[in-house]
């Protein structure tokens, strides 16, 4: 099993809060990439923070969204 270390200041998705805008990282094509828009954790999965549309992602880690990104 390969273990990918979390980049600095990222936290495991298992402890992501549902009441704040988040930047999430996902595994894609052999690497970890961050989404370019904020998302929120919901009871159904992950939603775009601005449109509230369901986003089909399975993030591996998160950090608080910085509004100046």
Image (cartoon, helix red, strand yellow):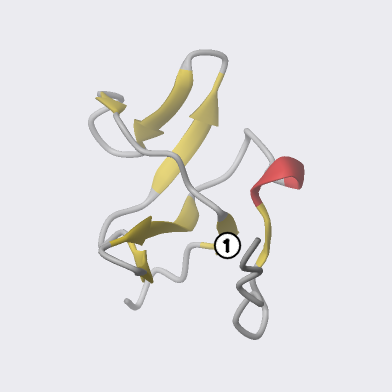
Q: Which quarter shows the N terminus?
A: bottom right
Q: Is residue 66 above or below residue 38?
A: below
Residue assigned mark 1: 64
Query: Could you say which is closer to the camera, residue 64 or residue 46?
Result: 46
Residue that protrudes farthest toward the top in the picture: 44
From the viewer's perspective, tell me whether residue 13 is left or right of residue 37: right
From the viewer's perspective, tell me whether residue 65 is left or right of residue 56: right
Q: Is residue 37 above or below residue 51?
A: below
Residue that protrudes farthest toward the bottom in the picture: 8
Residue at left offset 35%, top offset 78%: 68
Residue at left offset 23%, top offset 30%: 51
Measured as percent of width and height from the top left, residue 29 is found at 25, 64
Q: Is residue 31 above or below residue 26?
A: below
Q: Secondary structure at mark 1?
A: strand
Measured as percent of width and height from the top left, residue 63 is found at 59, 64
Query: Could you say which is closer to the camera, residue 55 or residue 50?
Result: 55
Residue that protrudes farthest toward the front in the picture: 1
Residue at left offset 37%, top offset 30%: 47
């Amino acid at each position: 099993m390969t273990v990918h270390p979390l980049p600095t200041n990222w936290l495991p998705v298992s402890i992501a809060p549902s009441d704040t805008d988040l930047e999430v990282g996902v595994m894609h094509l052999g690497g970890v990439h961050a989404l370019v828009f904020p998302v929120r954790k919901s009871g159904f999965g992950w939603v775009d923070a601005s449109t509230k549309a369901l986003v089909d992602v399975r993030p591996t880690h998160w950090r608080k969204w910085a509004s100046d990104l």
